[in-house]
Amino acid sequence: MRPIGWVESCFGEKFGTPRQSGVVPEARGRVVFTEEVQLGACRGLEEFSHAWIVFLFHQIEQGDERWLVRPPRLGGNEKKGVLATRSPFRPNRIGLSLVKLEAVHDEALEVSGLDLVNGTPVLDIKPYLPYAEALPEAETRGGFAQDSPEELAVDFSEKLRAALSEDDLALITRVLAVDPRPAYHDDEGRVYGCLISGHQVKWRVEGGRVIVLSRDAEIR
């Protein structure tokens, strides 16, 4: 297989990138196609609301598969088979992400609800088919990830709010609200950093609230 494109993402590194697509609707980006993708390859895709991105976990080393992993949703304390999880440490490093289509062009797709880091290689695009893939009856069998994680309140100083655009403020708020920290760490007070939309954002959790401490100048 060979990549047909790559992702331009608001997430500059793995830490801070949502663990599932659609969790942060404000997360926008693009799938930029290589020159070998011929004009017309996306003809008709604009008729669909969502699409699947088939991609490669390129930050995982070839051969670094793990047959038993520790899902963050279980606090990192219980092992599950890799094929029962969304872990990136897979036999062939292939991932699947469902995103909303914002615009379809010959050279790129504009998408939202992204959960991929900048530079992710794209192997294929497939339209989402509601009649076949929306399964309400499956809602009662969600395994160890039955419910969405609880969101935290996020606090900014007035100075920080004024330094961010409305779009970046909304994006950073939602990303931190779903708590990117490793689930097995009980470390309130520890300072973390995330590269989000070009901002190196520093924050900590206190009393169940995210306190945003600072953001460095934009990194592009």
Image: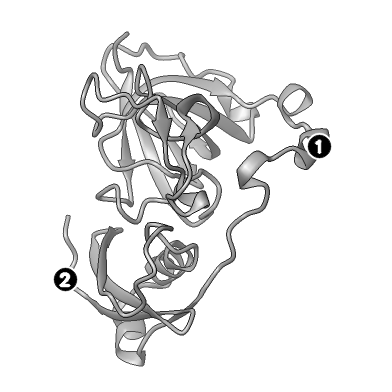
Badge 1 density bin: few <14, some 14–19, many ≥20, Cα 10 Å? few
Q: Residue at x 52, y 73 (%)?
A: 152
Q: Which colour scheme appears in the figure?
A: one colour
Label 2 and label 1: CA atoms lie apart by 44 Å
Q: Residue at x 31, y 83 (%)?
A: 160
The answer to whether 154 appears left or right of 59 in the picture is right
- Residues 95 and 32: in front is 95
Q: Residue at x 16, y 60 (%)?
A: 219
Front label number (2 vs 1) = 1
Name the quarter where the N terminus is drawn: top left
Location of mark 1 (residue): 136
Q: Is residue 31 above or below residue 115?
A: above
- Give the secondary structure at mark 1: helix
Q: Is residue 11 above or below residue 79?
A: below
* Residue 161, horizontal then vertical, whole percent: 36, 83
> Seen from this angle, which residue lies furthest front?
78
* Residue 81, horizontal then vertical, whole percent: 49, 28
Q: Residue at x 58, y 29 (%)?
A: 46
Q: In the rendered structure, find residue 13 and report the number of the disc placed on it.
A: none
| Amino acid marked by disc 1 | Pro
Name the quadrant containing residue 190.
bottom left
Of label 2 and label 1, which has the lower sequence position?
1
* Residue 85, horizontal then vertical, whole percent: 51, 34
* Residue 131, horizontal then vertical, whole percent: 78, 25
Q: Is residue 89 above or below residue 155?
A: above
- Residues 124 and 66: in front is 66
> Seen from this angle, which residue lies furthest top?
1
Badge 2 density bin: few <14, some 14–19, many ≥20, Cα 10 Å? few
> Seen from this angle, which residue lies furthest right?
137
Location of mark 2 (residue): 217
- Give the secondary structure at mark 2: loop
| Amino acid marked by disc 2 | Ala
